[in-house]
Amino acid sequence: MSGSNEAFVEIIRFDRFSQKMKYGGVGMVFGKINHGLTTNYFSEIFYESQVGSDGVPVVSLQAASKAILYDIASEISVALRFLQGREWFDANVQFSTTGLPPFSEIVVDGWRAEWGNSTRVDLEFYLEDLCQELELNDLIYSQEWYYAKASYLYFKDHKLPDHAMTIGILLSQMWWKLEQEDAAIRGRENQRSLDRANLAKKLRMKEQATAKDTVLVMYWHRALQEHGAEVMKRDSNAAQAIFAMATERRPRELQIRSSGKIIGAEAIRKRLVELRRQGKIG
């Protein structure tokens, strides 16, 4: 196939079994999915009905994508552990993969009691807000952002046939960017100037985070007066009330810089948990 962004399956080799399996499998096919600069390998059992006129198995893009779900789940599990190591998740959250391909998926344990929906849905919204937080703090296209975005796409709809290729593109872009940045850093003659720039960036991010927390505390007390303690004692309810207030008044501190949108209610809820722990709200 000609288009550089067009996905297609390439058969590397296939082997026939000495006898047909009891449920119809006649051999094993090995191949790869090419999508632009991204390549994902797969192996899958094939059946007599899948053999073409030339004797070579024909594997659809959808079937090949399903066969590599296990590898993608493993990559996403690595990404989630990376984010956890950067303290984007609670320390008691654990990620692991389970099952056999193509039924593998990520298991999440250790969520706080406030999470009321299914774990997969919770994690989808959590990661979406995490991406927004990273954008808000000028960390878009950082390693954290790429990992969060790829993980969000996985949990958003992990059964889409092309999700593995989409995630693969994100991850390949990330590694290319990091390698280029490392080369640029190594080529700098004055490392001290880079350190000063990084320190200034960290201080700016800290100031932005402090300003955001200040606005959240102020809105929480306003919402408390409006809705009462019974409603505000649950962070999920408080987050929705603050989100509605922020959507109407649009404070700059709670806007996502790239889009101007207000950060999501789940991102607000996450900060409320920490602010309550710090004793800044009741």
Image: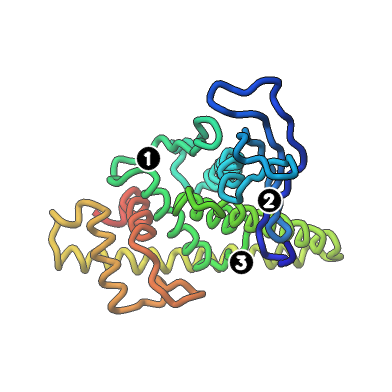
- Amino acid carrying mark 2 in the image: Val
Where 98 falls versus 256 (above or below)?
above
For image coordinates 53% across by 25% down, the residue present is 23
How far apart are labels 3 and 1 at the CA level?
A: 31 Å
Q: Position of residue 83 (x, y in %)?
A: 54, 48
Label 1 element class: loop
* Residue 222, placed above or below residue 102: below
Q: Which residue is mark 3?
A: 201
Determine the secondary structure under disc 2.
Answer: strand
Among numbered discs 3 and 1, the one appearing first in the sequence: 1
Do we see residue 85 in this rendering? Answer: no
Q: Position of residue 46 (x, y in %)?
A: 62, 35
Which one is nearer the viewer's eye here, 79 or 29? 29
Q: Which SS class for mark 3?
A: helix
Residue position for label 2: 9
In this view of the protein, can residue 282 be seen by the observer? yes
Pick the residue in front: 192 or 130: 130
* Callout 2 crowding tier (Cα within 10 Å): few <14, some 14–19, many ≥20: many
Q: Residue at x 68, y 47 (%)?
A: 40
Q: Position of residue 48 (x, y in %)?
A: 62, 35
Badge 2 or badge 1: first in the primary sequence: 2
